[in-house]
Image: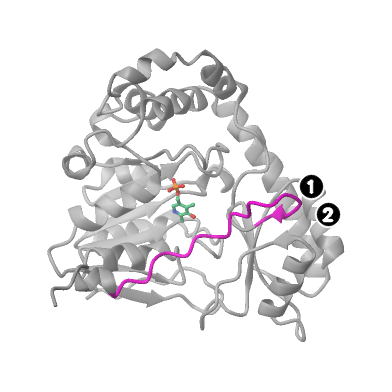
Amino acid sequence: MKKLIRSSVAGLTAYTPGEQPRVAGLVKLNTNENPYPPSPAVTQVLRDFAAESLRLYPDPMCNALRGRIAELAGCAREQVFVGNGSDEVLRLAMRAFTQPGGTVAAFEPTYSLYPVLAAADELKYRTVPLPEDFSWVMPPADLDAGLFCLANPNAPTGVFYPLESIRGFCRAFAGVVLIDEAYVDFAGGRDCLELAKTLPNVLVCRTLSKSYSLAGLRLGWAIGSPELIGALYKLKDSYNVDGLAQAVALAALGDVGWMQTNARRIVATRERVAAKLAERGFRVTPSAANFLWVLPPAGMPAADLFAQLREKKFLVRYFPGPRTGDFLRITVGSDEQMDALLAAI
Ligand SMILES: *Cc1c(COP(=O)(O)O)cnc(C)c1O
């Protein structure tokens, strides 16, 4: 009988997103969303938005947004790609920067979407194991891959890798390095933008989902050489970012100060909670993101703690597996949410 589904798709394991509970009353600390609302400029745009304008297709190139992002990044508009969430940027990069049957590489552990996207495009996925403390390791010089996905700060560990280490790797690596900066606004002003603006094989991607409190909007972007950016534009859906999202994103990026204030609050909460958990015997990985990667004290297995917190209506993230199964990833919420979590623990 003819197979209805392509074999590689039939064999695919889909990405497992964090639970999005549809019931009220849960303290949601599992998908790194922002506890604070988006800028009032966003609310204003939504109020004033003319439904009439949806009659027409949106700008396929997102030119107004590209201009604003280029202004913020200090680069040319041709160096900016705007996507339907940075997940779209990642998906397109898989195809744009590998040959058929080629290889994508990444550290282990890292963002668990990368291997899923590679498998969807029938690409091999090669991992470079991180050391026990999840700090930087130089990938091997003979690494043969078209694309290296490098989350910085890394997920789910929160570790920030030094710019000079990443620069050294980007210079040595023959393929494209995609530096995924989904959490960079919580990293105290450090980033790798300079590498995307100066090296021909480096892309940086960012998102409104975390620091800008707009995970529901689906808006991300990449910055790099016009050549790499042009390749992404060739592959995208014709109208990949809807008109409403373009308008809202422009408003959000017009109020960077609002985002920075929220990011500072989250960083202050993060440091306070990290110290409290350490006092209670948790091993807390130093975090440059809006979450904490913690090893619970002996006698308190992560899987059990996860289940017990779930019963008490606290949702955190547990990733089974040899490198991650002893840890929990806890999103930094508001101070009230985190105090309640500490009490529950
Ligand atoms: C959340 C996250 C993203 C996804 O961002 P979207 O713009 O919401 O698609 C990308 N990379 C990492 C590492 C993330 O944690």
> Given the current orientation, which residue lies at the most extreme bottom position?
299
Quadrant of the image for the N terminus? bottom left
Residues rendered magenta in the picture: 11-29
Callout 1 secondary element: helix
Kindly identify the amino acid type of the residue bearing the numbered disc 1: Asp
User: Can I make out residue 169 in this image?
Assistant: no
Residue 308: where, in percent of width, then height? 76, 73
Image vertical order of residue 110 relative to residue 240, above or below: below
Task: Tell me which amino acid carries mark 2.
Answer: Asp
Residue 291: give its label. Answer: none
Residue closest to the eye, 312 or 258? 312
Q: Nearer the viewer, residue 331 or 192?
A: 331
Percent across and percent down for residue 55 are 32, 18
Q: Residue at x 21, y 73 (%)?
A: 7
Verify CB contact (< 8 Å) between mark 1 and mark 2: yes
Mark yes or no: residue 199 visible.
yes
Label 1: which residue? 335
Tag 2 residue: 339
Provide residue 272's location: percent of width, then percent of height: 78, 54
Number of dots carrying numbers: 2
Position of 136 relative to 265 (above/below): below
> Quick check: is 16 in the magenta stretch?
yes
